[in-house]
Amino acid sequence: MWITSSLTTAKSPTLVALGNFDGVHRGHQQVIQPVLSAAASTPAAGHATVVTFRPHPQEFFTGESRPLLTPLDEKAAYLSRLGVEQLVLLPFDRALANLTPEQFVETILVQHLQARQISVGEDFCFGRKRSGTAKDLQAIAAPFGIQVQIIPLHTLDGERISSSAIRQALQAGDLTKANRLLGRPYSLVGQVVEGQQLGRMMGFPTANLKLPKEKFLPRQGVYCVWVCLSKSSHSASSHSSQALPGVMNIGDRPTVGGLQQTIEVHLLDWSGDLYGQTLTVNLADFLRPEQNLPL
């Protein structure tokens, strides 16, 4: 999959799914599917493209970092697995934020991306002060001959599927709900780094996992997990690694002047050197809150 942050290097013409897509959950997949189907049925129509923003607009306006369900590497891996051909990361800055809805369509979608078809969720807003709606996008794009497909909000068991709902479920330790809304297990993808090796001294060696700093973490505690080993940073998209059963603890470790949150994974009935490897830890169930055990 081609990934670019520059409109000058984006491949065109395009079939565009437009949005933030944090989590690439079931609802997002419904928005992306029309451009995948169009590209598959008529390859000459354009490149199946996801257009999103970096940083997240909320992060730009508030100046506060926003934890992500899927940091860039994870998002790219999931989109590639779906069959997306191109990911365009629009740099969200003051100039982009000040574009009117009409300017956004004409400059970004028409001139640079040569969009032939656009797919958005029905709650999509764009342009200066989020003044443009999905219906506005449809009306502005029509004179350019661009079809805009508006996808109804996706629900599951009567509940709207959203990144916010997934975050709330993860914060509550409700893995069943979070994974159902995602359409897959929630994953932590990170590199194994050296820790204090306390688990090894107690007879159950653990792998200390370093995650992207922007990764959203679920409730602290102990989880039942399935772990895939891979040396690729894009292991979220790897099917070659066997899933191994394990137990993971997310908790705080005392440090000088405060606490440091750690993610430690113990693989059941397995031994070997994991340092430097990338693990994909798929969360299956929340077992219990963290407990402090005497050494």
Image (cartoon, rainbow, N blue to C red):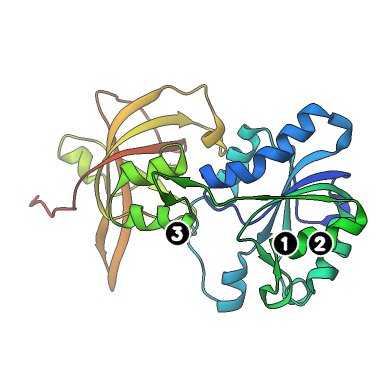
- Of labels 3 and 1, earlier in sequence is 1
Real-space Cα separation, disc 1 to disc 2, in angstroms = 6 Å
Q: Residues within 10 Å of mark 2 (few under 14, many from 20)?
A: some
Secondary structure beneath dot 1 equals helix
Q: Which amino acid does label 2 sit on?
A: Ala
Residue 61: x %, y % from top left = 60, 77
Give the quarter of the figure containing the N terminus: top right
Residue annotated with mark 1: 135
- Is residue 132 or residue 28 the one in the foreground? 132
Relative to residue 69, is residue 246 drawn left or right?
left
Residue annotated with mark 3: 164
Q: Is residue 12 above or below residue 225?
A: below
Real-space Cα separation, disc 3 to disc 1, in angstroms = 24 Å
Q: Which amino acid does label 3 sit on?
A: Ser
Residue annotated with mark 2: 139
Query: Do we see residue 122 in this rendering?
Result: yes
